Amino acid sequence: MEASASARAAVVARGPAVCSPLSSSSWAVARGADAARAVRCNAATEVSAPLLCALELGLGAEIFNSAEVVQWESGKSVNAIAAAQGIRVRRRCRPSHPSEGVGADRAVPRSVLEQIVWDKEVEVAQRKAAAPLHRVADSARRAPPPRDFAAALHGARARNGGVPALIAEVKKASPTRGLLRDNFNPVEIAHAYEKNGAACLSILTDEKHFLGSFENLETVSNSGVNCPLLCKDFVIDIWQIYYARSKGADAILLIAAVLPDLDIKYMLRVCRSLGMAALVEVHDERELDRVLKIDGVQLIGINNRSLGTFEVDTANTNMLLQKRGDIIRKKKIMVVSESGLFTPDDVAYVQNAGVAAVLVGESLLTQEDPGRAIAGLFGKELLL
Ligand SMILES: O=P(O)(O)OC[C@@H](O)[C@@H](O)c1c[nH]c2ccccc12
């Protein structure tokens, strides 16, 4: 996949007019490798800047994610790069490695998370075919400005005397629990959450495994709620970030169990360029250590649920904060405890562990009135 010399010259000639000067390191070449799509890029640390430039230039219809650039440059499979970082989820639909995961290996996902990611690869490919990146990026940039997700958490926590801020989740179903409620009206639930003191809302958009949708995100966003919105999905491609922004998301979830470091760095740059926050989710010490080495992470979610086994243990938040609390505080990173919180004792436990916020779905959604359930969860009404 070599870009022609004239293509390189053309891009390099156009690039610096819009972007900062680029060091010579590698080439990310769009699928199809035509001249107009060749993008010069530095694959070491600044990989996203040139790619963002490429978008500005209208070149970026099919640009690879960062880890793919390294793969392309080093000849290593992206799965080998991910595995070296402890990531157990394999990717299989990488266009540049169509032969990966053939045979028996290809047919059998090793975990629910791997199945979800494989389904997501198919979904994103189809969505991209229908709405190419440059078009989605255009509508993302035309969307109403994003609201400050982190500031909303900060403010709510300060108002409530240090009680963790609430990110309340709008989720119809989950792979482990099945349907969470029959009468699922995302707009009604969102307003009930906001009225009862939620600082931010998390909207599930994965359709296949959580019965969520981008329509839910969009209708909630257009319904007059003021809480910033987190798009909760399995992001594997920057296309999804632009799409989420175009549908009203103010923040997006990035899952360290799925994304190699370079993809996280790249995606953080994309978020920053759109004014969005990123909640970077970890479950274990290795993932947390990887994420703590990445500059610019402001929000870390500690998932009490393993996405591999789906077991939940709130002690996970405590354990990771005991081990890495010092460095987290030094870096002024806000921590969100995610999943499996049901009682005021659960909230007090993670509050004592040092979290700034909690992300709660099931325990609110399974109650008759999810808004009123908030006071039950915290043992008191939250101040607005
Ligand atoms: O419903 P719970 O147990 O309160 O959990 C909410 C949230 O943490 C959970 O939905 C979640 C955390 N990380 C995720 C990643 C993808 C999908 C869902 C999630």
Image: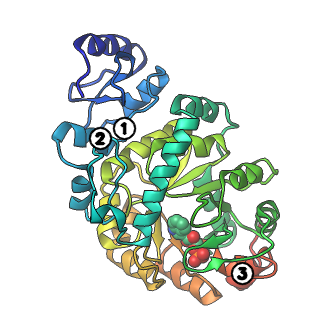
Frontmost of labels 3 and 1 is: 1
162 to 72, vertically: above or below: below
Question: In the figure, residue 41 lies in which quadrant?
Answer: top left
Which residue lies under the disc numbered 1? 64
**Relative horizontal placement of residue 238, taking residue 293 as reference (left or right):** right
Label 1 sits on a secondary structure element that is loop
Q: Do tag 3 and tag 1 residues touch (Cβ < 8 Å)?
A: no
Instruction: Give the residue drawn at x 37%, y 41%.
Output: 65
Name the colour scheme.
Answer: rainbow
Mark 2 lies on residue: 96
- Upstream in sequence: badge 3 or badge 1: 1
**How many angstroms separate mark 2 from mark 3 (CA)?**
43 Å
Across and down, in percent, residue 52 comes to: 43, 30
The answer to the question of whether label 1 and label 2 lie on touching residues, with beta carbons closer than 8 A, is: yes
Q: What residue is shown at x 30% (from left), y 56% (from top)?
A: 293
Looking at the picture, how far across and down is residue 111, in whole percent? 39, 72
Residue 344: % across, % down: 64, 87
- Seen from the viewer's position, the closer of residues 149 and 364 is 364
- Ligand 1 contact, mark 3 (Cβ < 8 Å): no
Residue to which mark 3 is pinned: 366
Query: In the image, is the residue at mark 2 within 8 Å of ligand 1 by its beta carbon?
Result: no
- Frontmost of labels 2 and 3 is 2
Q: Position of residue 343 (x, y in %)?
A: 64, 87
Number of numbered discs overlaid on the protein picture: 3
Give the residue furthest to the front. Answer: 103
The residue type indicated by label 1 comes to Phe
Residue at disc 2, secondary structure: loop
Q: Residues within 10 Å of mark 1 (few under 14, many from 20)?
A: many
